[in-house]
Amino acid sequence: DEVRELVYVTGLASNSLAVVSVADPANPSVRCGVSDTTYMEFARGVAFDTVRNLAFVADMTSNSLAVVPLPNPPPPPSLPSPPSPPPSSPPSCSDTVGRTLIDTGCSKADASSCSSYFSWKDEAAGVVRLCRGPEDGSSKCTRSLAYGCLPPASPPLLPPLPPPPQLP
């Protein structure tokens, strides 16, 4: 039984059937068994019905087939848990790329698209608020802080225009 990692084994000399767990192949363990000298004398073959939990054991001496009900096997082994996602990286200045600068705090940003906005907490110190959320049960955006950010470059100053020509 591949799903439950069980093997059904007949014992020719012991007139028996054993159900062996091979979940740990290095340490197989007998889960249950039955011995019967009348119906399984020199038991030599077995088939198993996983739906009805019935073993069919061939008897060599009487050329008969014994139908053996077995207890419900243990549930299939648990699958390993999927790996945990990697921890999220701390907010960084590059997270402002593609976001719109707002002059109000994140709590006043449009809650339907929080992650589209950022604002300066302290432009001189390079601290920005990255809007995110809203958190469960809230209708407002929350924020994370990123440090060491440079303000956007100011547009270059153009030289002054010459005065307009004098009309005669």
Image (tube, rainbow, N blue to C red):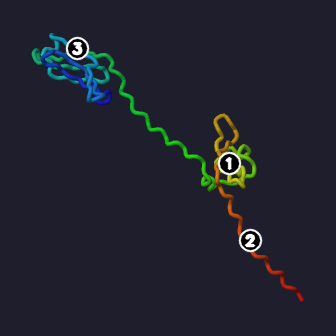
Which quarter of the rendered picture does the C terminus lie within? bottom right
Considering the numbered disc 3 on the image, is that residue within a helix, a strand or a loop?
strand
Q: Earlier in the sequence, mark 1 or mark 3?
A: 3
Which quarter of the rendered picture does the N terminus lie within? top left
- Vertical side of 116 occupied by 17: above or below: above
**Residue ID at (83%, 81%):** 163
**Residue ID at (31%, 16%):** 71
Q: Earlier in the sequence, mark 2 or mark 1?
A: 1
Query: Could you say which is closer to the camera, residue 147 or residue 84?
Result: 147
> What's under tag 2, amino acid-wise?
Leu
How far apart marks 3 and 2 lie (CA) works out to 94 Å
Residue 67, horizontal then vertical, whole percent: 22, 16
Q: Tell me which corner region of the image, top left, top right, bottom left or bottom right, holds residue 50.
A: top left
> Which label sits on residue 129?
1
Residue beneath disc 2: 157
Q: Nearer the viewer, mark 1 or mark 3?
A: 1
Q: Earlier in the sequence, mark 3 or mark 2?
A: 3
Considering the numbered disc 1 on the image, is that residue within a helix, a strand or a loop?
strand
Question: Callout 3: few (<14), some (14-19), or many (20+) C-alpha neighbours within 10 Å?
Answer: some
**Residue ID at (29%, 20%):** 53
> Which label sits on residue 34?
3
> What's under tag 3, amino acid-wise?
Val
Considering the numbered disc 2 on the image, is that residue within a helix, a strand or a loop?
loop
How far apart marks 2 and 1 lie (CA) works out to 29 Å
How far apart marks 1 and 3 lie (CA) works out to 71 Å
> Which label sits on residue 58?
none
Q: Relative to 95, is 29 on the left or the right?
A: left
Question: Callout 2: few (<14), some (14-19), or many (20+) C-alpha neighbours within 10 Å?
Answer: few
Query: Could you say which is closer to the camera, residue 47 or residue 25?
Result: 25
